[in-house]
Amino acid sequence: MFLGHFGAGFAAKKLDKRLSLGTLFLAAQWQDLILPVFLILDIERIRIDPGNTMFTPVDFVYYPFSHGFLSIIIWGALFTGAYFILKRNARGAFILGGLVLSHWVLDWIAHRPDLPIIPGSEIKTGLGLWNTIAATILVEGIIFFVGIFLYVRITKAKNRSGNIGLWSLIIFFILVYIMNLLGPPPPSEEPFAYVGLAQWLFVIWAYWLDRNRKVSV
């Protein structure tokens, strides 16, 4: 998934208004933020295989450390512990840990059975939503726009940047989604990894955006 993860980040602002949208995006998208790093370091592997699913040409060959079920539990625990130590906010810490875990749940719905349970195991899982383009768009769209609705309900712009920045981010998300869906597949694995690093810009954008908006309720 792509939009679904960010939709979860938007929605989680309602659960603890002290959490920055940037931190929420960081937790919700953590696995896809570190995957490109692991690919570049040759710790994990993908291959470009048009037709692998109807929705994406990427075959996730080996990625137990970023996307394995056991790894997600560990990452979630680390997020929870680190945030609590830094901020002494138990509620926020558990929300962030839950967002990390939500990434695996949403991927489990979307992916074909390629999500590993533990490193070294051949047991993999996934419900295969990506095998149906219309259903994928519908499910992701619902999560994304519900998340935006909740975020807009509880925040308002402090200034013009807070308003323009939000809608520009939403439009940019949608354009990236359309380009990924309709554009040509990546020419090889390496460009996929380096383009994936650009997702960190969404986290930075969200931190900036949240500083230009305030909680309204």
Image (cartoon, rainbow, N blue to C red):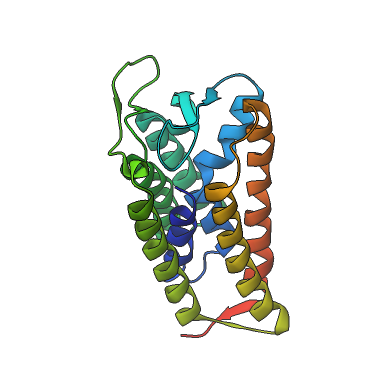
Q: Nearer the viewer, residue 163 or 3?
A: 3
Where residue 96 appears, x then y in whole percent? 45, 53
Q: Is residue 125 left or right of residue 91?
A: left
Query: Which quarter of the picture shows residue 213?
Result: bottom right
Vertical arrangement, residue 157 with respect to residue 101, above or below = below
Vertical arrangement, residue 150 with respect to residue 74, above or below = below
Inspect this view and state whether residue 95 appears. yes
Q: Is residue 175 left or right of residue 107?
A: right
Q: Nearer the viewer, residue 26 or 123?
A: 123
Residue under the point 35% across and 22% down: 118
Q: Is residue 182 left or right of residue 55?
A: right
Where residue 53 appears, x then y in whole percent? 40, 36
Residue under the point 63% across and 48% down: 199
Vertical arrangement, residue 155 with respect to residue 44, above or below = below
Q: Is residue 217 left or right of residue 165?
A: left
* Image mark count: 0
Residue under the point 40% across and 19% down: 119
Query: Which quarter of the picture shows residue 163?
Result: bottom right
Where residue 94 appears, x then y in whole percent? 39, 53
Vertical arrangement, residue 84 with respect to residue 217, above or below = above
Where residue 39 appears, x then y in whole percent? 60, 26
Query: Which quarter of the picture shows residue 64?
Result: top left
Q: Nearer the viewer, residue 147 or 70?
A: 147
Inspect this view and state whether residue 87 appears. no
